[in-house]
Amino acid sequence: MTYPLFSSLLRSIVILSLAGFIALAGDQKAKAPDSLKAELTDQQEIQLSWMGADNAAQFGIYRAEVNTVTEDLDYSKLEFTKVEVVKEAKFTDKILTESNKDQPLPSLFVYYVTAIDKSGKEVGKSNYAEVSLSTKSKEKMLN
């Protein structure tokens, strides 16, 4: 004896289970970049590097410029600007350009990086990394 209602219900459960499994397998979100480092070079640039994030299609680079550094500086309260979107886990910020060479440089640059998934959504944020420009390094860059 067959039970058409039971067979139909069982078939629906199997189809829904397979659909859920396929959706979960395809829904791998990008994770936040890790171990962000920033280094001042002799070529008037700041080199950023980090550990790539799983499933990230791109990375967003954010920078804040600080003119007055205090001991209790709270990075989360700084005003960050997105400066670039890159595909590799590295970026070189050319902080001294022809257009700004006559302007005073900030004392501190602070960065963070986000992971951007395949749909273009920013999904994870790295640690902060900073580069301090001493008076000596500022003078060297401007000469």
Image (spheres, helix red, strand yellow):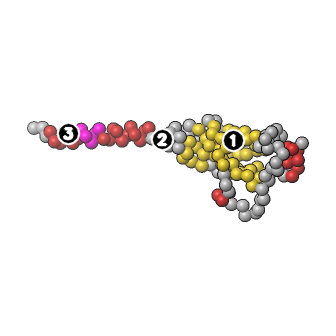
Asked which quadrant contains residue 74, the reply is: bottom right
In the image, what residue occupies the spot 66% across and 59% down? 77
Q: Farthest residue toward the top?
A: 87
In the image, residue 119 lies at what x, y percent? 50, 39
Where does the N terminus fall, quadrant-wise? top left
**Residue topped by disc 3:** 8
In the image, what residue occupies the spot 83% across and 40% down? 42
The crowd level at tag 3 (other Cα within 10 Å; few <14, some 14-19, many 20+) is few
Q: From the viewer's side, name the closer residue of 129 and 119.
A: 119
Reply yes or no: does residue 13 show up in magenta: yes
**Residue topped by disc 1:** 49
Overall secondary structure of the magenta section = helix
Kind of element beneath mark 2: loop
Tag shown at residue 28? 2
Q: Total label count?
A: 3
Asked which quadrant contains residue 61, the reply is: top right
CA distance for labels 1 and 2: 24 Å
In the image, what residue occupies the spot 40% across and 40% down? 23
Tag shown at residue 108? none
CA distance for labels 3 and 2: 32 Å
Q: Farthest residue toward the bottom?
A: 72
Kind of element beneath mark 1: strand
Q: Earlier in the sequence, mark 3 or mark 2?
A: 3
The crowd level at tag 2 (other Cα within 10 Å; few <14, some 14-19, many 20+) is few
In the image, residue 8 lies at what x, y percent? 20, 39
- The amino acid type, in three-letter code, at marker 2 is Gln
**On screen, residue 80 above or below 1:** below
In the image, what residue occupies the spot 77% across and 43% down? 95
Cβ–Cβ below 8 Å for labels 1 and 2? Answer: no
- The amino acid type, in three-letter code, at marker 3 is Ser
Asked which quadrant contains residue 78, the reply is: bottom right
CA distance for labels 3 and 1: 55 Å
